[in-house]
Image (cartoon, coloured by chain):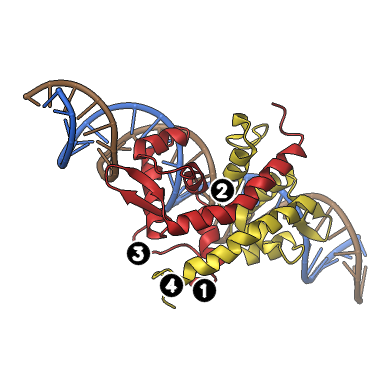
Chain colours: A yellow, B red, C brown, D blue
Amino acid sequence: MADRPVRGSRTGRPIMALLDLLGRRWTLRILWELRDGALTARALRSACDDASPTVLQARLAELRAAGLVEHAAGRGYGLSEEGREFLTAFMPLYAFAERWAASKPTTPG
Amino acid sequence: MADRPVRGSRTGRPIMALLDLLGRRWTLRILWELRDGALTARALRSACDDASPTVLQARLAELRAAGLVEHAAGRGYGLSEEGREFLTAFMPLYAFAERWAASKPTTPG
DNA sequence: GTTCATGCTACTGATAGCGTAGCAACGAGG
DNA sequence: CCTCGTTGCTACGCTATCAGTAGCATGAAC
């Protein structure tokens, strides 16, 4: 996992790089949990259902390489300027999720 | 992978269910490749860099269970009404990807 | 009958992720 | 100096997921 940028980025289409980046476990979740501000690595872990630090660190590294997440020493991880742009672009999907769940039978509770 | 709806859906927050659904390999890609109309299972496979039919079938099943994808016998797989809504909500992220790639050094071409 | 395309499944081997434990660095308090 | 508690990060063994290839059953055209 060193020089390989992002799976699919060689197609030249940025959307493929993004699709591939987001299509990995915890990636979207991390970005989402960071929406209200920076979190320490351990706090982020708690927010993400205590996911393995192994994967979390890997995702954080990818996200930092992608320029979406930044790390302030001692203060934890937070969204970068681009990360916040991402989240803004993501919000319509949040709205969709609400409507989607409302029309789904698989939402008993 | 039988009765379990979607990881994280028990939190009651639909966004978690969506985040989790999308955070699986090929899920986002499938939805994206279906944007211009239905594709047969094999055509979809080609569009998805010849991904394993095993995973593709699994994703297709999940996507159908989620109500985002439909299957017309002989005609292939296509987005449902909700699937199209999803894609509409996804478009801002497409726009973001373009800007994002432009500001990234990791896009030599 | 043969041929072709459809959707789908069965394997085996590789990769990614999980769960737990632990390390090094830094600051506060004694 | 030492201890304590926090930080970010890594190692290890085990499991689940994915990859890659092959193959099945169905249906239409000929």
State the image coordinates of residue A25 (x, y, percent, origin top left): 55, 52
Q: Regarding mark 3 in the picture, which secondary structure is present there?
A: loop
Residue C9, picture quadrant:
top left
Q: Chain of mark 2?
A: A
Q: Point out which mark residue A24 bears.
A: 2
Q: Nearer the viewer, residue B56 or C10?
A: B56
Do the residues bearing badges 2 and 4 touch, measured as CB atoms within 8 Å? no
Disc 2 or disc 1, which is closer to the eye? 1
Quickly name the residue at label 4: A107
Crowding around mark 1 (Cα neighbors within 10 Å: few <14, some 14 to 19, many 20+) is: few
Asked if badge 3 and badge 1 are on a common chain, one would say yes
State the image coordinates of residue B38 (x, y, percent, origin top left): 40, 43
Q: Chain of mark 4?
A: A
Above or below, C6 against B9 in this view is above
What residue is rendered at 38% in x and 59% in y?
A: B65
Asked if badge 2 and badge 1 are on a common chain, one would say no
Q: CA distance from mark 3 to mark 4?
A: 13 Å
Asked if badge 3 and badge 4 are on a common chain, one would say no
